Image (tube, rainbow, N blue to C red):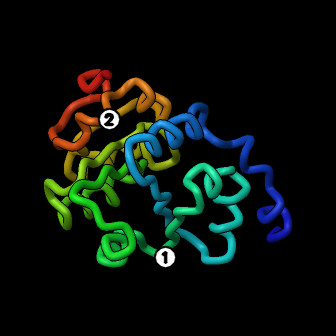
Amino acid sequence: MSSFLVDYPFANRLYPGSLDVLERLRQWGPTVLLTDGDVVFQPRKVERFGLWEAVNSHVLIYIHKELALDDIVSRYPALHYVLVDDKPRILAAVKEAWGTRVTTVFPRQGQYAHDAKAIASFATPDVTVDRISDLLDCDLGSLRTPSTRSCAEVKR
């Protein structure tokens, strides 16, 4: 089973437009892939997806990323952060810790993005998009000022 997972063709499962979004975000500022998971499996998965290269090796992997915010700030200091995550729990925890220093973006794509109970249990993200690729149509500069809205309201 572990061989199957290690050699799984993850690139075939990448959401359409994901690499284009990362390329666009890199033009705006340093782009860091912040992920959590198994310390052996997760780096391999990130590499096989092509994401490691897409963010110029700026990858941080934690067991629980929402508990590593001080480490993230020390490695990548910024006046403002934009966090894109499909887990409402993560977005809410980071928003609570960083407040207006972060704009949270919730793509309704992924295994956690349609969990109605989880969505209702946590604070509303600043921006919601249907698909990660919708960020290609957003005015990224407007993401510096957090307020609850959809990507349609922050078109470029």
Is 95 left, or right, of 29 in this rendering?
A: left
The residue under label 1 is 63
Query: Element type at marker 2?
Result: helix
Depth check: give the residue in front, 5 or 104: 104
Q: Earlier in the sequence, mark 2 or mark 1?
A: 1
- Screen quadrant of the C terminus: top left
Looking at the image, which residue is at 56% across and 38% down? 18
Query: Element type at marker 1?
Result: loop
Looking at the image, which residue is at 47% across and 45% down? 26
Q: CA distance from mark 2 to mark 1?
A: 29 Å
Residue 25 at x, y = what percent? 44, 42
Residue 49 at x, y = what percent? 68, 51
Depth check: give the residue in front, 36 or 57: 57
Is 49 left, or right, of 126 in this rendering?
A: right
Mark 2 or 1: the one toward you:
2
Q: For residue 90, what is the image quadrant?
A: bottom left
- CB under 8 Å between callouts 2 and 1? no
Residue 103 at x, y = what percent? 25, 48
Is 143 left, or right, of 111 in this rendering?
A: left
Local crowd size for mark 1, using a 10 Å CA cut-off: few (<14), some (14–19), many (≥20): few
* Residue type (three-letter) at the residue carrying disc 2: Leu
Is 63 left, or right, of 57 in this rendering?
A: left
Residue 129 at x, y = what percent? 37, 32
The residue under label 2 is 140
